[in-house]
Amino acid sequence: MSMMSGILNLINGHLRRDLAARRGITGIPLRSLCTARKQTDGDGSSSVLGKRWKDTADTVIIGGGCVGVSIAYHLAKAGVKDVVLLEKSELTAGSTWHAAGLTAYYHPGINLKKVHYYSIKLYESLEAETGQAVGFHQPGSIRIASTPDRVDELRYQMARAHWHPNPQWIITPEKILELFPLLNMDKVIAGLYNPGDGHIDPYSLTMALAAGARMYGAQIYNPAPVTGLTPTSQGTWDVQTPHGTIRANRIVNATGFWAREVGKLIGFEHPTIPVHHQYVVTATVPEVKALKKELPVIRDLEGSYYLRQERDGLLFGPYEEMEKMVLQDSWVRDGVPPGFGKELFESDLDRIMDHVEMAMEMVPVLKNADIINIVSGPITYTPDLSPMVGPHQGARNYWTAIGFGYGVIHAGGIGKFLSDWIRNGEPPYDLIECDPNRYGKWTDVPYMCAKARESYGFNNVVGFPKEERFEGRPTIRTSGVYELLKGKCSMGFHAGWEQPHWFYKPGDDAAYKPSFRRTNWFGPVGRECKLVMEKVGVIDLSPFGKFIVKGADSHKLLDRLFANNMPKVGLTNISHMLTPNGRVYAEVTITQLSPGEFLLITGSGSELHDLRWIEKEAADGGYDVDITNVTEDLGVLGVAGPNARNVLQKLTQEDMSDAGFKFLQCKSIQLAGVTLRAIRISYSGELGWEMYIDQNNMATVYQAIMAAGQDQGIDNVGTYAMNSLRLEKGFRGWGAEMNCDTNPLEAGLDYFIKLNKPADFIGKAALQKIKAEGLKKKLCYITVETDDVDPEGNETIWLNDKVVGNTTSGCYSYSIQQSLAFCYLPVELSSVGQKVEVELMGKRYPAKVVQEPLLLTEPTRTRLQKKKAKSTTA
């Protein structure tokens, strides 16, 4: 503790001047300083009036941090004319200027790996392209594992890394010590090594991107605060500033911790909040200075901190526990104080002392190090820690690039991602985990604060599969049966909703026990699968997104949006929205309720993602339609299994027989005295109905169904069982087997794609070209010979020590008692009988391509039985 004495006195003016000097001057060429000075001299008016003010723009980017400037750079470099960036004070003001600047190939998300990879490759070449030094160091990084669970986590992540280009592998304690000789190795078991990782000077990076943006024709105005945003009927925006108004085709909110204030200008309450993040910088450490090469960045996951070399000293930043960390929630209530930009918060060593002590134990030279700086600055968090990137539902041509807890490593890749999307009308790859539309009005301030606190405190916890985090739950989104079910099951969180994952019985271990292997839910899920296959089960499906589309042009609009034909009145089908390049943007169940009135059902995680796409096409095409989101109005119950018909028939006068209620038919019926819409579906391949009920009547209907089914063996089932049942029947899932990374032909969706239908649906021409040229990869169905671990998706597939593909989803099939998965393989390896290996937890398990499905669906079984009976009779 002695080394900490008097540290707090170093904060305020001296610290800020020192950090500004360290971040803003060191390593920057004189020409760069001159450029920067021209941008900020005086009161700002001369810097704007010294260049021609643009009254119109293709794209106006609001915010001059590293993310906003990267978007401007990439758009301009790609040839987009009239790109304008507006910065309220000076470039890097906000979170960028005080960031620790870490750059890492590693990310547990699948496609965020692509963002990180692109960023690092860009930063490696940016200085040569722009002439601006960026201060990029690449000594590598090591994620330290000091518990068995951590080693498992490294193995789990490696299985998901091999099919990406990011360099990454697990290394031994001996190799770790060789790379970082100052470590205390007493607790170190293994490490995850990324040789290209490191850190970059955020100020220099931003200035280099700004230089590149100007070089390619973008205009950067500062100080130019945005004072108003007015949408026009044509879908453009009038962007008001003290210097004039710009008419823009689109606007991009990239304003960091000002994101909520800019959002409020057009009526949005973006769920972002600043977190106090602290890091410590030491003076020269003799042992560090004596090293011949720079130390790699380490992340001590149990200690919950990162540590890297800073000149001849060290810099380390902890992530405090959720009970200790601080949110700047006053900014949510009252707004960011006027003039706040390159300021810092008061530091608080007491909050981080536990982490400091663990850092001193892991890196003993810290015990004698003198601290020269403690930085405490605002970093923006979203509830789940991922940024909000893309066009926003509810406002035409309004885009966001906000909520970056790791803006420096995301800046390059996100700039390219958004530039490609803006120019091409579709995302270059799937990044739905960052879709701003994953949040909705249910994301209120108490929820946002609770989740941001949890996410910050959980930064370095073990990342288990099927992980649940419980702070801030439940939200206002609870179905009509939530109170009846919450004490009987393990709930999952889906787009704000609580939805049962699995149900426990007396004698079951009901605790939440996440694991990389089969855990306490494995047996109960098998019980639920058997229930649906042999008797009858009930599931709460209320989180489905639900829209009503009606009006004079409704049929015409949907024919343009979807690749399938529209169903006739009273019928239902599965349809897909495609991107212009023929990728699968969404999968939707469509029912024509009455002439020109359609009910559209989509997954919980894609509700506003899909609604935005539909609304955009309707507005851009001038269609005469009315689109209503009824997601929260309607609850949904699924009833499935061979006894489902017997149960429902007890509660209605409607004929529920095959002849009276056909497959994919929709009817308005009375059930237990409640009027609802029922759709006969193949629930995960089994006989079933989905019932769409007013939320207020949902509990009544549920209780009546459960009472009527007692003699039929009825019980509850959850989504884990539904996933197993759908996989063994060969049902594809959106977000796994199909998304914006895949086209419907390679995903095996040919049956739903009507290339010969008269309407020119979006993506039709691209699909015709893809079909003519032939496929390069194909979705395959494989069985896997495993032990106590099952595939779940995104694992690497090997053949002869070469990576040949990846799984998309997987599970254990309780019906055939074997693990199975969907995967993408090159066409030449897609034949039935092809043998491959699937990597799971550090081992490669034998797998084989098989004919799908493993089990026939109920409609197919019924059809074959009727055919056989008819043949026997004849």
Image (spheres, rainbow, N blue to C red):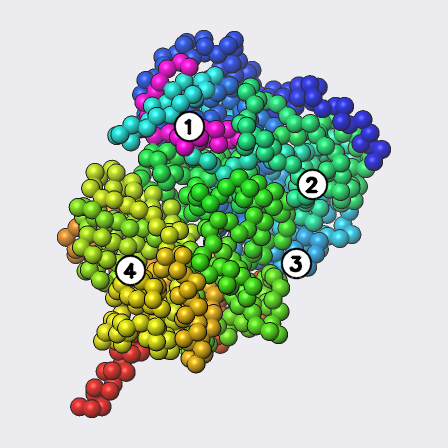
Instruction: Measure the alpha-carbon separation of dots 2 and 4.
Output: 49 Å
Q: Nearer the viewer, residue 296 or 595?
A: 595
State the mark number for residue 265: 1
The nearer-to-camera label among 3 and 4 is 4
Neighbor class of circle 1 (other Cα within 10 Å; few <14, some 14-19, many 20+) is some
Q: Which of marks 3 and 1 is nearer the N terminus?
A: 3
Q: Earlier in the sequence, mark 1 or mark 2?
A: 1
Determine which residue is flagged by label 3: 149
Residue 715: x, y in percent?
A: 47, 73
Q: Looking at numbered disc 2 in the image, what kind of residue is underneath it? A: Lys
As helix, strand or loop, the secondary structure at mark 2 comes to loop
As helix, strand or loop, the secondary structure at mark 4 comes to strand
Drawn side of residue 794 relative to residue 690, left or right: right
The residue drawn where x is 46% and y is 39% is 388
Q: Looking at numbered disc 3 in the image, what kind of residue is underneath it? A: Asp
Q: Which of marks 4 and 1 is nearer the N terminus?
A: 1
